[in-house]
Image: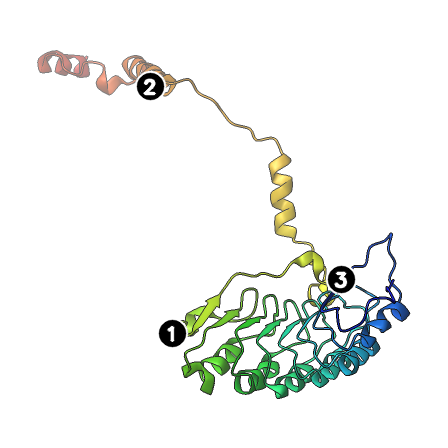
Amino acid sequence: MWHNDIPDDVIAILAVMSYPEHKVSRDGLMKIAKLSKLRDVHMSQNLVVNDDLLSAIAIGCPFLETLDISSCHRDVTGVGVKALDFCSSLTTLDISYLYKVDDESIQVLSRNGRLRCLTARACSGLTDSAFEDLACLCPNLESLDVSGCLDITNHTVTSFLQSPGSDQEKTLLLCIGGTSVVEEDLDMHHPYITFCVHDLSQNYLRADTGIILPDPEPDTDSEDDANSETKPVCVSVVAAGAEMDNDMDNGWEESENNMYYNDDDLLYGDDPLEMERFEFS
């Protein structure tokens, strides 16, 4: 996996991809910690990444600035993320879809105050408490993406709106789509904070779907509606003008019946004298 003739001070960016035809072992990944000059590491969707590897990288790569461990959800927990506190130069971190990451891990990372970009999409273990310290202790934060984190509410947004750094002339992008933030209850017009209300998370990357989204109960109403669509519908089709013809026919029949069976109207309109003679006859 590694080329021994390449000195560690030459390698600045490392991308480790895990494909079925190229199985990456944990022992092989552990050698990353020996690259002391490493600055950027991208290990997205590598299920062999675990807390021990992150701890080793945090200690062995003191110059690490960017780390992408998104979708490494199998064995990465808050313990491994908290170990990254040793990386004093870490400014960009992507922990998206790590549902085992908790609030405390983000609070620990906030202490170094160097984070500029944090992407934490669909991290169901994170709540508003995770970002209170981040808003206060990381004045250089430029981007925070919590798309798809269902437990994030207006409190997180308020923490950044009221933080001391919100008055400085710096731009901050907050991505809050797919959360429990109620936009109508917030004043989202801020000179230095831009809001993205689109959900940028991808459901197919979520490993916690069965936990937070249980199977829906069968909807009887929808089933009835579905069955009703398949049932034949009886409709009486009447040619245009047929209603008028029927009315006319009924009218003639009624007038004829009155003519022959209603004695009161037999001589209606005739001479009154003739009617009187008829009555007394």
The residue identified by callout 3 is 45
Q: In which quarter of the image is the N terminus?
A: bottom right
Q: Is residue 264 left or right of residue 225?
A: left
The part of the image, by quadrant, that contains residue 40 is bottom right
SS under mark 2: helix
Q: Which mark is residue 203?
A: none
First reached walking from the N terminus: tag 2 or tag 3: 3
The residue identified by callout 1 is 191
Q: Which of 192 and 263 is in front in this view?
A: 192
Query: Residue shown at 76%/67% (left/top)?
Result: 72
Separation of disc 2 and disc 3 at Cα? 74 Å
First reached walking from the N terminus: tag 3 or tag 1: 3
Q: Do the residues labelled 3 and 1 touch (CB within 8 Å)?
A: no
Looking at numbered disc 1 in the image, what kind of residue is underneath it?
Pro
- Image height of 257 relative to 15, above or below: above
Q: How crowded is mark 3: few (under 14 residues within 10 Å), some or many (20 or more)?
A: many
The residue identified by callout 2 is 244
Query: Residue shown at 86%/73% (left/top)?
Result: 30
Q: In this view, does 60 lie to the left or right of 119?
A: right
Q: Nearer the viewer, residue 5 or 125?
A: 5
